Image (cartoon, rainbow, N blue to C red):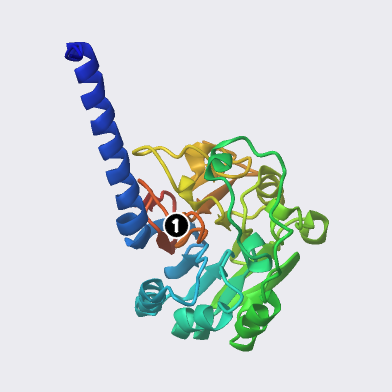
């Protein structure tokens, strides 16, 4: 007859069972609950000249929308109720060849608001199944460009027909409620499509607000925007880390430090306000995921309403 297991072995077995149960519970929460638990973030940016009233800028990024994602589409539609004065879309809208009508439907009335946009890699190329562990490893420069192309041209046409401005490797201006914005935008730096030479040079000193826009917040782009005098830079791409420890991202999928994977920060990091060659940097954790990695943990999907004001200081949530 077999002897009973040693008490230490019984304890180890219980611990292993509890760990497996906790892991499966966490995975179920990440895949079923948090990935659909959309959040509206708010932050205040003190970048307007004295005498200008506040402006509301809605930052939307990384929808990764498939036609079947009705809940996400419905939530994005509600953002029009915020009545933003400007919409900035920092890319990765698509997740399926048939997603363009779904994206245009989800954005809905927001397309009637002044807006600007750039694209990310998942506007250009269809997602594919890959080992998720690779996401946690250092970037080796491998890019997902061998999958079918997505109809980004149709998406661009849909945005431009409603009046949004394409900032792909170009500069432009918009006047919103009497406030003039000077924009610079680049194509996706993650794919090395960014052409910094095309947008290089001092930001327009006659504008009231100077804003740089990019999908992926690579340091080469952030450094140039800051050096050229863009007080505010908006980006996406990181998914906020997507699978995080409480209060801490592990990765950014680019060369930005994990401490700035989402939210409002300074660039260069910790530069005091008013420092020449420094910017406010807002990185959106985005609203979606790859359909092949549909999980989020300690990093809810989000859009952000930025209130631009005159005067020093900022408040983020």
Q: Quadrant of residue 5?
A: top left
Nearest to the observer: residue 133 or residue 94: 133
Nearer to me, 130 or 64: 130
Picture residue at 61% right of the left edge, 70% below the top = 117
Left or right: residue 176 versus residue 276 is: left
Residue 253 in percent (x, y) is at 59, 45
Q: Provide the secondary structure element on which disc 1 rests.
A: loop
Relative placement, left or right, of 160 versus 28 is right
Instruction: Answer whether residue 23 is visible to the viewer in this image.
Output: yes
Residue 83 rendering spot, x and y as whole percentages = 39, 78
Q: Nearer the viewer, residue 190 or 19?
A: 19
Task: Residue 84: give x, y in percent of width and height.
Answer: 43, 75
Q: Residue furthest right?
A: 197
In percent of the image, x 41 and y 48: which residue is there? Answer: 313
The spot of residue 1 in percent (x, y) is 18, 14
The residue depicted at 42 percent of the width and 62 percent of the height is 304
Task: From the image, tell me which residue sits under label 1.
Answer: 294
Q: Is residue 273 among what the camera can see?
A: no
Image-quadrant location for residue 294: bottom left
């Amino acid at each position: 007859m077999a002897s009973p297991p040693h008490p230490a072995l019984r304890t180890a077995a219980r611990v292993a069972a509890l760990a497996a149960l906790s892991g499966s519970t966490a995975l179920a929460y990440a895949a079923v609950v948090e990935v659909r638990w959309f959040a509206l973030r708010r932050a205040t940016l003190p970048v307007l000249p004295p005498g200008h009233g506040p402006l509301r800028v809605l930052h939307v990024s990384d929808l990764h929308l498939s036609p079947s994602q009705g809940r996400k589409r419905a939530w994005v539609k509600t953002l029009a109720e915020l009545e933003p004065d400007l919409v900035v879309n920092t890319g990765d809208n698509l997740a399926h060849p048939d997603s363009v009508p779904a994206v245009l439907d989800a954005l809905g009335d927001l397309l009637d608001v002044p807006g600007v946009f750039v694209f990310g890699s998942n506007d250009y190329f269809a997602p594919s199944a890959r080992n998720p562990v690779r996401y946690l490893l250092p970037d080796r420069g491998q890019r997902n460009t061998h999958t079918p192309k997505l109809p980004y041209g149709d998406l661009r046409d849909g945005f431009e027909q409603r009046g949004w401005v394409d900032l792909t490797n170009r500069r432009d201006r918009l006047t919103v409620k009497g406030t003039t914005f000077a924009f610079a935008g680049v194509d996706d730096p993650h794919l090395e499509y960014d052409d910094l030479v095309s947008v290089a040079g001092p930001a327009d000193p006659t504008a009231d607000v100077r804003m740089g826009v990019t999908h992926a917040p690579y340091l080469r782009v952030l450094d140039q925007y800051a050096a050229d005098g863009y007080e505010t830079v908006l980006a996406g791409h990181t998914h906020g880390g997507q699978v995080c420890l409480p209060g801490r991202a592990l990765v950014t999928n680019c060369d930005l430090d994990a401490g700035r994977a989402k939210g409002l920060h300074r660039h260069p990091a910790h530069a005091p306000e008013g420092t020449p060659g420094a910017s406010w940097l807002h990185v959106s954790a985005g609203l979606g995921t790859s359909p092949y990695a549909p999980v989020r943990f300690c990093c809810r999907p989000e859009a952000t309403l930025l209130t631009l004001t005159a005067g020093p200081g900022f408040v983020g949530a």
